[in-house]
Structures are given as C-alpha cells and as structure tokens.
Image (tube, rainbow, N blue to C red):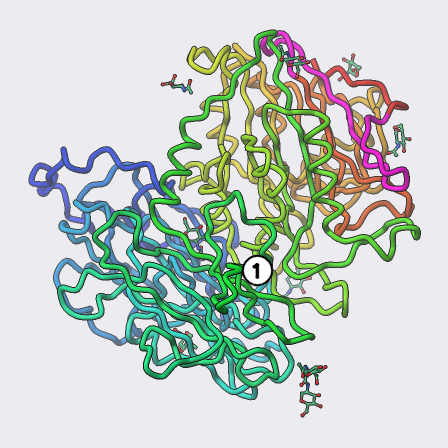
Amino acid sequence: MLILNLLILAPLLGMNSLTHAFPLNAVTKRNKWPEGSCVVDVKVEQCNDFDCKMDGYHRIDTFLTQREHADSWNYLFYKTEDEISERCITRIKVVEEDGSKPDGDGWDRIKANGGPQIYAQRDTAQQVKGKVVDLVVLRPGRWANSTENFTRESINLGLGEKAGDVAEEDWREWHAVSSGWVWLEYTLGGPRDPITQVQVVACPADTDATQCGSDLLSQGFKRRDTDLNGPTENGSHVFLFTSSEPVAEGDTSCVGGLKVVKTADEGDESILPVDLNDGTNGTSLYLSVIRSSGKVPGSCLTSIVPLDTSRYFPRAHYTPVLLEDGSGSGAPASLNAGIASADPIYLYTSTEEDFRAIHKKNQGVNLSFNSTGGFRIALYSDLHHSSYAPSCRDIPDAIKHTCSEEFSIDLMAASLDLTKPDLVVIDGDLFAENDRASDEVTYPLLTDAAMAKAIHPILERGLPFAVTWGNHDAEGSLLREELQRAMDIQPGFLGSRGLNHLDGIGNYKLDILASADSGEKKHSLWFFDSRSYTYLAENGTASGNYGMVEQSQVDWYAANADNSVNALAFFHIPLGQISDRVGLNTTAITGVHGESVCPQGNGCDDEVNLETPHVPLFDAFIKAGDVRATFSGHDHANDYVIDAQGIKMTYDGSAGYTAYSAGDQNYNREMRVIDITQWGSTASSYKIIDDILQGTVHRNESEPIVTLY
Ligand SMILES: *[C@@H]1O[C@H](CO)[C@@H](O)[C@H](O)[C@H]1NC(C)=O
Ligand SMILES: *[C@@H]1O[C@H](CO)[C@@H](O)[C@H](O)[C@H]1NC(C)=O
Ligand SMILES: *[C@@H]1O[C@H](CO)[C@@H](O)[C@H](O)[C@H]1NC(C)=O
Ligand SMILES: *[C@@H]1O[C@H](CO)[C@@H](O)[C@H](O)[C@H]1NC(C)=O
Ligand SMILES: *[C@@H]1O[C@H](CO)[C@@H](O)[C@H](O)[C@H]1NC(C)=O
Ligand SMILES: *[C@@H]1O[C@H](CO)[C@@H](O)[C@H](O)[C@H]1NC(C)=O
Ligand SMILES: *[C@@H]1O[C@H](CO)[C@@H](O)[C@H](O)[C@H]1NC(C)=O
Ligand SMILES: *[C@@H]1O[C@H](CO)[C@@H](O)[C@H](O)[C@H]1NC(C)=O
Ligand SMILES: *[C@@H]1O[C@H](CO)[C@@H](O)[C@H](O)[C@H]1NC(C)=O
C-alpha cells in the first residue's frame, strides 16, 4: 500500500483556533434528517493494492483508474463527523490538473496525485444553516449525467477516452467504470431546496442522448436521466430539467405543481412548448407548470421523479401528475400515451414536508413484544423486481402464459394477511436488472419504480419493515447510497444507513422492547450489508467472488453486541458456515439443499474454504454470544437450516417469480416466518409456500417447525 501524506491531516485543516468562535449552540446537535453526518475531508490517494485503507476514512469502492489502462490506481476516501462544526465541508469543486483555485473564500486544496485537483470550501454561513456536504459518491459511466439530489462536478476523475476500447456502456457499475468516466457528486444536508424552474428538452432520435440539453447544466439545471419518451422506437429524446435558482434576484416563488395537457396554447406561458411524445405518432402532450408564491409551507415541490408504473404509489409519499383533458377524470398522465410499442411513464412529485412527516413518523416507531411475549417476523428474499414487465423464470408450464411479477406481489400480500407479522424483513435483492417479458430486451432498471413494487403490499398494510441490500440491488438507476435514502422516507421503514465509516450501506440494529413505551430492551435484530462482489487484490478485476461483511462492520458489531439478550442477524449473502460440507455439524439440516452454496467472499461451492478469504463475522458471533440464528437469501434453491456451533444458520427461501429458482419447474416460491416467544428467550421458524397450482398459500406441513433457540 502506498499512501501519501496519510497523517498530515490535522494541520491541513488548520481549524483549531476557530473552535470557540463557532456558534456551537445553533448547530452542535445535528438534525437527524436526512440520515448521515457531515463530511470533513475528501482525499484521492494512490494505492498499489485493492485493499488499501486509510485510518478513520471511508473508501469509495469505485476505483478511479484500472490497471489495464494505467500503472497506478486511485481511490477516493472521505472522513465524516457526527456533529456539525467548522470542519464541515459546504462545497466541493474539481478543477483540471493545472487549473486555479475556485473563486470565493475558504477554499482548501485537497491533496491529489496528479490529474484533476479537488478543492473543498468551508463556509460558516452554510454550516449554521446545516447545509453541509453529507454524502460524497462516485457515479460511473458517461450516461447518468446528473440526478436530482446530487451536485455533479463536471470534470471526469476517470481516464475518459484514454481508458481505451470499451464497448460496454451500461448503468451497471462494473461496466460503467471501465468506460473511463467517473464523476464526483455530493449532496447537502438540511432541507432540500424548492424547485423554482422546470424545462423540457427534446433532441432528435439520431443524436447523442447523453448530450441532450447539456447547455442547461451550465445554467445550474439538473437533469433526470429517464428519457420521458422512451424506450420508443424513432421517438426524440425528451429530458426533464429542474433548477432551484430563483427566477429573478430576490424572487421567492417556486414550482407548486405540474399538470399534463394536450395542447400547447401559445398565449399560456405556463405550458412548456415541447411535445413529450415528439417524433412519434403518439398523443401530443405538454407539461404545464403551476407556480406558487412559496409563502405557504409545503407549497413548493422539491422532487420530481419519472417512473414507469402508476399502480404502486397510493401509500407512498409521491403525488402523481394528472392529465388535464377537460374530462375531469383526474387520472395520472401516461407520458407515452398513444404509442403502442412503449411502456407508460408517469411523473410523481413531492414536497419537503411529505418526506419530513414520514421520516418523523418512522422514527417514533418502537418494536415491542405483544401482551403474551410474542413477536412475529415475516421474512422475504430475492424478489428481483424491476421496471417494465420482466419475465418469470423456472415456473411450471401451467402458468407460463399468466405469470408476471404480480405473482411475487400477490405472494407477499397473501402471506402477510395469513401471518399478520409485527415486522417485515426483506433480506436483499429486492431488485435486479431483468429481461422484459415481451421482447427479452434488457432495459435500464428505474429503481424508484421497482422499489414501489417491492414494498407495495407492506405499505398497503401499514406494517413496519426493515431491509438488507443484496448483490443485485444497485444494478439500476440508484447507487447503494441512494437506495438507502429512497428507502429512508418510505412509510414504516425502520432501517438506516449506519455509520458512514463502515463498509457497506445499511448496517444497523433494531431492538424489540418489553412494551412500546417501556424502553426495556428484550431482544435485538442485527442487519448487515454483505455488499455485492469482491475484486482481485492484484489488479482490481472482478474476482468472481461475492461480497462480504468486512472487518469494519464486524468491529462495530463487536463493540455494540450485548449478550444479556438474544439476537438474530440478517444479511443477504450467507456465511460459508451455512454449508453442510464444512464439517461443523451436518446433523441439523431441515429443508432443501437445491444448489451449491455461494457464500460471502467465495464463488459457488459447497466445499467452502473458511480461511481463504477469512470472513470474520462468524467468529465474532461466537465470541459475543448474542446472535442465536442468522438469515440469508442469495441461493434461491436452498431453504434449509443448519446448526453451526450452536448458531442456527438459516436460508430465507426465495419469493421472486422473476428470479431463477431450482431447475425443477415446480419449485414453489416461499417466505419464512420467525416467531420470537417468551419475551425473547425462545424462537422458532417455518416456511410458507406459494402453492401456485392449487392457488393456496400455506405452511409446508411436511417440514417440522424448527426450534431456533
Ligand atoms: C454530461 O456530463 C458531462 C460532464 O459533466 C458534460 O460534459 C456533458 O455535457 C453532460 N451532458 C449532458 C447531456 O448533460
Ligand atoms: C421507425 O423508423 C423505421 C425507419 O423509418 C420504420 O421502418 C419503422 O416502422 C419506424 N418505427 C415506428 C414504431 O414508427
Ligand atoms: C403508430 O406507429 C406504429 C408503428 O408504425 C403503429 O403500429 C401504430 O398503429 C401507430 N399508431 C397510430 C395511432 O397511428
Ligand atoms: C403474540 O405473538 C405470538 C407470536 O406471533 C402469537 O402467537 C400470539 O397469538 C400473540 N398474542 C397476542 C395476544 O396477540
Ligand atoms: C432524492 O432524495 C429523496 C428524498 O431523500 C429520495 O426519495 C429520492 O430517491 C432521491 N433521488 C435520487 C435520485 O437519489
Ligand atoms: C418509544 O421509545 C421512546 C424512548 O423510550 C419513547 O420516548 C417513546 O415515547 C416511545 N414511543 C412510543 C410510541 O411508545
Ligand atoms: C488480473 O489478475 C488475474 C489473476 O492474476 C489474472 O487472471 C487476470 O488476467 C488479470 N486481469 C487483468 C486485466 O490484468
Ligand atoms: C416441503 O418440505 C419438504 C421437506 O423439506 C421438501 O422436500 C419439499 O420440497 C417442500 N415442499 C415445497 C413445495 O417446497
Ligand atoms: C449439532 O447439532 C445438534 C442439533 O441441533 C446440536 O445439538 C449440537 O450441539 C450440534 N453440534 C455442534 C458441534 O455444533
């Protein structure tokens, strides 16, 4: 490992003398929304291996260069603190290698090894308002230019054209990075800014969609990367741009709402004169922008999201944009109306108040045992929802022509009604990039839409829920960080991002109390991010092995484990100890072993080598002694339980009809029930199968109920 200037950080900041001048009482206690803390330092460092680390810093796993194209690699590291102070960065700028310091006060250059230079600004006025950088991400790929919550720096940190011949241009990280384009983006804490301007731009079908409307970006507009006219054959590229800059100096008005209309009346300036179906023979549609004085709280839009489904949003915080056609029907406007070959796209809006109300309500929920000391968890895994309409896989012939992802939604709905849980857990791979049923073409996954499908039955029933992320979840339009944020404001979601400096997103613990207002902890539930994949230490190429829970996460667990109560642990990719071939205990299996185990840090092989690589989580469980059972998905055709040194290692069973299953075409999708009883001192589990040919959802009676502890 070759890290330059590792320990010269404190003098760089030069802040000590300011500590007392800062108006501490105004902001020391951070508003806990949105989740996360403030970024106090960003560094690009050269590494000569792919495991390089910097003490106290979080490493972004996207590398800035790759060995086949360069003789060194750079990683971006950032450091966070929980409290807002004068150390918090309020703006970031990337300038060319020979570029000069940005205009304005308070800019410090961040050390970088050649190439583009990074500057950070610390502006007290912004710090006092809580407008501090709370998240830094690297967004790979030429496409995906800018997303609504993120400010993108317009200089590529990757190798660009020098990356060589990269045919693959994709939303998926592992392809996109090799394209040589990696952008630094960041978000600010505090309330989101009201949208003050909306623009729609259409560009001819034969032009480069990534360039469509790019002149607006220099005027401070942000673009949503969903083509509002797509995917359609021959249609123009149509993109939505929003800005939060005031229309005129001192103007506090904002965009209060949107409508879709069928004619562009030239006298009506509120209607944007660009046909949303430009270049097709579909219905002409125009966006009408309703202005608000901005004086009434909640009257400004802060978010506009294009989605490809209208069915799944009634309980979420989104409001659909309606079609005003004079009929008074008030139906959500399908932006691809009249184009037979296209899937519909709808626009949804929300305000800051919508988000805050939900987030506040979620934070007030305490999990607790019922009056007889019981607590029930309904557990699902591997739903593999996507946008558009993906094909079902490995299903009986009898349902070949009717099966769709609605089957997964129905399974969840029926089993929730049957089991009436106190908490729902989805244990990873909620989404995946699937083939579309009609033509087997893979379209980019619009993750907001897939998310709405995955949690629809839960929101409909108003249940609290928790989630872990799997290896497929970040294949779509949202990075892992964004997934967490988008989930954070779903009604009933109790999970959280976890500490910034840990590996992975979504490491958290939920306690089950004796009663809701007792504050008395009786049982704990741990959630870990087992991440996606691992990369070869020699050259950073994908190793073919799955991700794992890293030492930083294990250290956090070990520091917080409390063996005075029992606990369960949830993570998408199983630990190698779940294999019945590693010699720990082969006697306790219940359920089906239908495919090889594909555990953390490894490929797929039942003969797991537990030492190479050594995954530290299992040993930490044994040492701390609180975790009595673990739950994982990932291997869809396995649904067994094994006892490994006293810990019941459990497969969730797969609930997704659009995910692969066992070769046996009659294999049933299923979910798992966990009953914690006697105020946390005992627990048991069983599976509920979706007997699709009989049309019933019931317990698999040929298996005993497993005693977990
Ligand atoms: C996309 O981003 C790059 C880098 O910021 C910029 O050069 C290009 O103009 C952008 N294109 C569009 C259409 O936003
Ligand atoms: C798209 O254009 C091609 C070439 O003009 C034409 O053959 C095809 O029918 C068009 N498709 C649609 C959906 O209009
Ligand atoms: C639009 O064009 C497509 C492809 O040519 C055709 O199938 C469809 O019938 C046309 N729709 C209308 C309303 O003309
Ligand atoms: C308490 O929870 C257990 C486990 O879910 C359940 O069997 C029992 O009926 C519940 N008791 C009450 C009073 O709701
Ligand atoms: C922007 O933030 C909101 C609220 O946190 C979230 O729902 C939405 O998904 C975010 N959008 C993106 C593109 O990350
Ligand atoms: C949840 O627990 C907190 C802390 O013990 C308490 O202040 C709050 O009132 C509880 N909420 C409910 C709904 O009981
Ligand atoms: C990376 O290293 C592995 C193992 O040494 C090797 O098989 C592979 O070809 C290398 N890939 C590149 C792109 O250098
Ligand atoms: C029910 O459980 C038995 C025993 O584990 C198993 O063989 C069978 O395949 C299961 N049935 C279904 C439909 O999953
Ligand atoms: C093996 O499993 C049995 C049944 O659960 C259990 O009693 C025993 O302690 C386990 N042995 C080991 C070495 O884990």
Mark 1 surroundings within 10 Å by alpha-carbon count, few (fewer than 14), some (14 through 19), many (20 or more): many
Placement of 35 over or under 162, stated as above or below = above
Do we see residue 650 in this rendering?
yes
Nearest the viewer among 7 and 479 is 479
The x and y percentages for residue 271 are 37, 75
Q: Is residue 691 found inside the magenta-colored segment of the image? A: yes
- 184 above or below 207? above
Say which of 318 and 424 sits in front. 318
Residue for badge 1:
446
The residue lying at 72 percent from left, 69 percent from top is 441
| Residue 646 in the image, given as x and y percentages of width and height | 71, 17
Magenta residues, start to end: 676-700
Front residue of this view, candidates 223 and 118:
223
Residue depicted at x 37% and y 59%: 150
Task: Tell me if residue 496 comes above or below residue 154 in the rendering.
Answer: above
Amino acid identity at mark 1: Leu
